[in-house]
Amino acid sequence: MSRPASGHLYFDLKDDRAVIAAISWKGQLSKMQVRPEEGMEVVATGRMTTFPGQSKYQLIVEDIAPAGAGALMAMLEKRRAALAAEGLFDAARKKPIPYLPRTIGVITSPSGAVIRDILHRLRDRFPRHVLIWPVAVQGQACAPEVAAAIRGFNALPEGGPIPRPDLLIVARGGGSLEDLWGFNEEIVVRAAAASAIPLISAVGHETDTTLIDHAADRRAPTPTAAAEMAVPVRADLLATLDGLRARQSRASATLSRRRAERLQDLARALPRLDGLTAGATQRFDLWSGRLTGALGLAATRKRRGFDPLAALLRHRLLTDRLQREDDRLRHLTERAGQLHARTLERARDRATALAARLAPALARLIAEAARNVTRGQGALAALSARLDAAPAARLTALEARLAALGRTHQTLGYRETLKRGYAVVRGDGAVVTGKADAEGATTLEIEFHDGKLLLGPRAKKPKSGPAGQGSLFD
């Protein structure tokens, strides 16, 4: 085969016995469902001509079809194996489908039932913002338009005036292998494999399989099933959210109660201040009481021991002795006071350390409770924002549907039929649909696309007998 810059296709048709030159002009080539390839077994339809420049016959081919489904399937299998060898169908390169996309891009025909089924199912499950890229879903223009649509959605910038879709759906209803052939073209498969946006293929019915199904990140058996894969059920999400909110409230209450119980347990474990000093105070009082009696008894005994010498040294010895005893008593009193002060100081230090440990524990408990409250408020704010955006999205979808219905009504109106050469005949104000009604009417009004023509009034004519048929305008 040869295709020069002119766009015409020059090739040879041959069997096991003969060969003949063939040409497909550029205009004829664009209308072919299947592009000829080397080694294809085909049925070529055209007309025989001669080429004087080379003194030979040639066939001007107007249409080419594979020689049966077997040849077409063989070509499809060969193309599938070649693309699979390049790794375009590997499971490792497939991207996960987003759980709840903000914007969904749909690549399909805007006038078919497929887009209505997808939009209807999205409204039932979870309304989302939908962008539709209209394409031809069969014929010669199908493959380049679908590939351009996939690349176009991927080229949209993030945060631009047109929101970039989070998910793409390529959809088409069922059909024959020839009708779905555009989705087997290499340009479509490569565009689907190169898409940075996750893509769902919903081409044909459940039994139909095309090459874009292998390259897509997910295959849906029908376009309706693709819509079900794209979004979850909003009612189920709300029920799950309510359950999680209830669990969060119960968990917060349980955590607060356990923290309070732990704090009470720690408080009960702390000793009281009077309990820390009671033992030392009791021992001090005991030894103080014993000390007074012991000192007096010791002084008496010493005093009795000095009686034989009292005459000689009574005054001096007694004075010295009493002085020493007073010094000793004062020393013991000072030691007892110091012991009591040290005991009180240790008790005060222990109480201060316990208080210092208690304050950070209370601060951590209060901070944890504040963080839990803040996270709950953030979740409620996000839910409120989503609920506020839902009515606007639904209103936009309803406006788009109303505009589509208006265009359909205008297209199917009877005035469009009048422009194609038809007319409406009214007799006595009512639409006339038969010859008998027209003969019985006194006035006739004929409406064309550019105005009305009034015929009448006129007298009724009796029905003609067997001799002949009367004229409506006699």
Image (cartoon, rainbow, N blue to C red):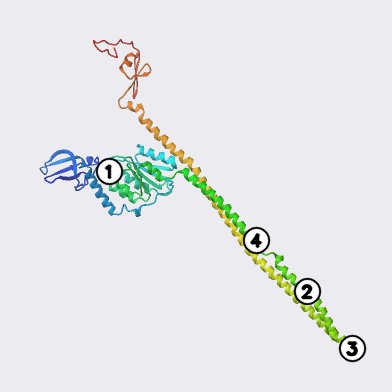
Image coordinates for residue 252, horizontal then vertical, percent? 57, 53
**Considering only order in the chain, which callout, 4 or 2, is on the residue closer to the N terminus?**
4
Asked whether disc 3 touches disc 1, contact meaning CB atoms under 8 Å apart, the reply is no
Q: Amino acid at mark 2?
A: Ser
Q: Residue pushed farthest left?
A: 55
Q: Who's the residue at 79% across and 75% down the image? A: 290
| Mark 2 or 1, nearer chain start | 1
Q: CA distance from mark 4 to mark 1?
A: 80 Å
Circle 3 residue:
311
Dot 3 or dot 1, earlier in sequence: 1
Which of labels 3 and 1 is toward the front?
A: 3
Cα separation between marks 3 and 1: 146 Å
Give left or right: position of 138 versus 161: left
Q: Which residue matches tag 4?
A: 267
* Mark toward the viewer: 4 or 1: 4
- The quarter of the rendered structure image containing the C terminus is top left
Residue 205 appears in which quarter of the rendering?
Answer: top left
Mark 2 → mark 4, Cα distance in angstroms: 35 Å
* For the residues bearing labels 2 and 1, Cβ distance under 8 angstroms: no
Residue 118 location in percent, x, y? 39, 40
Q: Would you say the residues marked 2 and 4 are in contact, meaning their CB atoms lie under 8 Å apart?
A: no
Q: Amino acid at mark 3?
A: Ala
- Name the residue beneath numbered marker 2: 288
Q: Label 2 to label 3, Cα distance in Å? A: 35 Å
Secondary structure beneath label 1 = helix
Badge 3 crowding class, 10 Å Cα cut-off, few under 14, some 14 to 19, many 20 or more, is: few
Q: Earlier in the sequence, mark 2 or mark 3?
A: 2
Quadrant in the picture for residue 304: bottom right
Q: Nearer the viewer, residue 406 or 252?
A: 252
- Dot 2: element: helix
